[in-house]
Image (cartoon, rainbow, N blue to C red):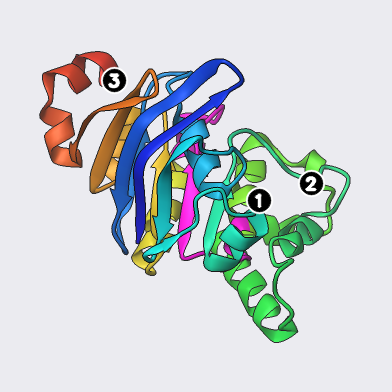
Amino acid sequence: MLSVTGLHAGYGPIRALDEVSLNVEAGQIVCLLGANGAGKTTTLNCISGLVAATRGSVRFDGVDITNARIEDVVARGIVQVPEGREIFPTMTVEDNLKLGAWLQNDNQKIASNLARVYDLFPRLQERAKQLAGTLSGGEQQMLMIGRALMAQPRLLMLDEPSLGLSPILIEQVFATIKRIHAEGLTILLVEQNASVALDTSSYGYILENGEITHHGTSAELKQSPHVREAYLGG
């Protein structure tokens, strides 16, 4: 479904990515692991069109989308949930969700997708008329995932969904990720919590200083001495 080949990117003179290549097959959860500053978010942003690639290619369903416009990437079915709590705090929860459907004009389908999001996240339905800025951190993460699902993605890219959450909330968020994957959604997951990420995914890539240094099935990566020492606490 997604093929990234020889991707290079940077910020001015700073090199962020160097020959990054990865693949995501339809129906997979693939994780991208690495320390802060390794280039994980830049990789997602290049796929989304937020950051320009200076070399290499991004192909989706065989179509070259390298440096495509963001709205064109979303229209093809790639939707990114960014790191942090990127919501509209002075708008209601429901209005935040409906913004995810900005490319759609079928009101019946939008209503159906909203009902699905509320089924996944009952807490959001309870708080539908509240201002999004009044939600807890965990609820805001649910809102961001729900808003992305309103766009009917074929590939969902999640950037650090566990960031700043308590262990109980992390468990809840990842249970939902597994549920939407079981319903057929393909997922590319960026996550610092390597143990949770490898338990959730079927394949993984390790990104270090802008380069892919290891990749394999999640089971293989769990057994790798380097991965165990650097990311799993030995």
Within 10 Å of disc 3 (Cα), the crowding (few <14, some 14-19, many 20+) is: some
Are the residues flagged by discs 2 and 1 in contact, CB closer than 8 Å?
Answer: yes
2 or 3: tag closer to the N-terminus: 2
Quarter-wise, where is residue 135 in the image?
top right
Q: Which amino acid type is marked by label 3?
A: Tyr
Q: Which of marks 2 and 3 is in front?
A: 3
The one nearer the camera, 48 or 119, is: 48
Magenta residues span 148-170
Label number found at residue 132: 2
Residue at screen point 42% across, 21% down: 38
Asked if the magenta segment contains residue 160, the reply would be: yes
Q: Which amino acid type is marked by label 2?
A: Ala
Q: Which amino acid type is marked by label 1?
A: Leu
Q: Position of residue 98 (x, y in %)?
A: 75, 64
Residue at screen point 41% across, 47% down: 57
Label number found at residue 231: 3
